[in-house]
Structures are given as C-alpha cells and as structure tokens.
Amino acid sequence: MKKFLVGVSALATALVLTACSGNAGGSAPGGGAVAQGGPVGGTTTTSAPATSSPTPTPTPSSSSSKPKPTSSKPKPTPKPTPKPAAKPAANAAAVPCKAALASPGVSACVDLSALKTWLLQDGKVIYGPVKQLPGKKGHATPTGVFHVSAKVKNYHSKQFDAPMPNSVFFLPGIAFHTGSLSVYSHGCIHLSAAASQKYFTTLQNGDMVQVVA
C-alpha cells in the first residue's frame, strides 16, 4: 500500500513539473524568449520581433524662390550738347581806315568822331571796336597815317605829371595808354586798362596807326 501511494505521489509531481515548463502560448516574465515543446521533445527558442520605427522618406527640397527677371530697362541715349553758334566775324566794312585795312600785318584804326578804335591784321578785325577818348579842344589828336615808334610799360608824363601805363607812341608825345574814358586827353588816345594792355602786347614798332576824323 505504501508503494502504491509513493508511486501516485511521484506521478503527480511529474505532471506539475511538466505543466510549468510547457506553458504553451504564455510569455516569459520581462518579455523574454518563450520556450515551447518541440516535436522530438527538444526546445526551439523564438525571439520576439524587434520593433523598428519607419525610416522617414526624404522630402525633396523645393525652392520656392523664382529667378528674378533680368529685363533691365535700356538707358536713354544722352542727347548731344548743341555747340554754341560761332560768333560772326567783326565787320571790317565798319572800319573807316582805308590805309589800315590795306596794310599787311598788324595795324590800328582810330575814329575820332565815333570814339572807337580797332586792331587789324591783314585787313581783318582782330580786336574791337572799343571805346577811346582822344584829345580835347585845343589839344586835338592829329589825323593821318603814322607808325608805332616806341612802347613804354609804365611811362610817366613829366609835362603833365601823370602816369601813362601801357604807352604805345605813334607820334612824339602822342600815344595809346590807360586813361579816363570820361575826361578828354591832351592829344593821347585814352583806353581802358584791358584795351591798353591788348594794344601794348599786339602793336610792335613799325606797325601802322591811322587816325581819321
């Protein structure tokens, strides 16, 4: 009887052990591998499927900036600057000095009544007319054809104790020079400072000077 009870107890223990190790469809603690009974009494280990996050598909970069149009406006063509009209040549016909007009080289003409004077070269006007003031009554400037005899830059008249800048003599004691254009002279031809400078630099010894009434 004792042997029979021992056999039954051993069989019961074996059945409990077999139930614990099989656990079909169960999961091991901690989510590990599950051991299942093989067809020949062995065990096959099956790992749980690894979960992996899906790799994002790269989105093609799209540039939203459009190329700027390169249609620049053409620059306006600058208008050519009009050239100033050429000044008409001085009218030699207005010069009353026939001898001075016919003389080759440089010459001067003095019109006593018109209070004008010119510089000429080969019969053409190169300067003037400019205002001049001749000798007063009793000291009239002589008329005729003369020639430059001397030039003195800073002449001083001893007779009248007066300065005569840019003196160009064409008669003894008679000259073109800087002087008043409101007071008549003692026979000389008064010119402005600018005009007397021009006469002084242009006229040379021997050049003709014609004075008409």
Image (cartoon, rainbow, N blue to C red):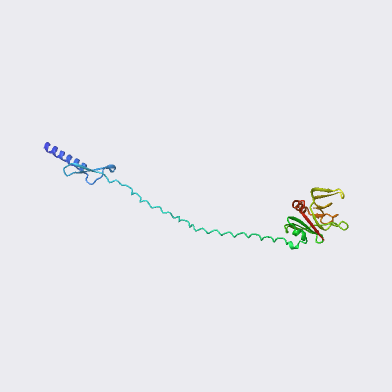
In the picture, the quarter occupied by the C terminus is: bottom right
In the picture, the quarter occupied by the N terminus is: top left
Farthest residue to the right: give it. Answer: 138
Farthest residue to the bottom: give it. Answer: 93
Q: Position of residue 11 (x, y in %)?
A: 15, 40
Q: How many marks?
A: 0
| Residue that appears at 80% across and 55% down | 146
Q: In this image, 53 relative to 72: left or right?
A: left
| Residue that appears at 78% across and 56% down | 209
Snapshot quadrant of residue 45: top left
User: Which of 82/62 is in front?
Assistant: 82
Q: In this image, 83 relative to 119: left or right?
A: left
User: Which of 161/16 is in front?
Assistant: 161
Farthest residue to the left: give it. Answer: 1
Q: In this image, 58 relative to 181: left or right?
A: left
Q: Position of residue 26 (x, y in %)?
A: 24, 45
Snapshot quadrant of residue 104: bottom right
Q: Position of residue 182 (x, y in %)?
A: 83, 57
Q: Position of residue 32 (x, y in %)?
A: 27, 42
User: Which of 185/53 is in front?
Assistant: 185
| Residue that appears at 77% across and 56% down | 108
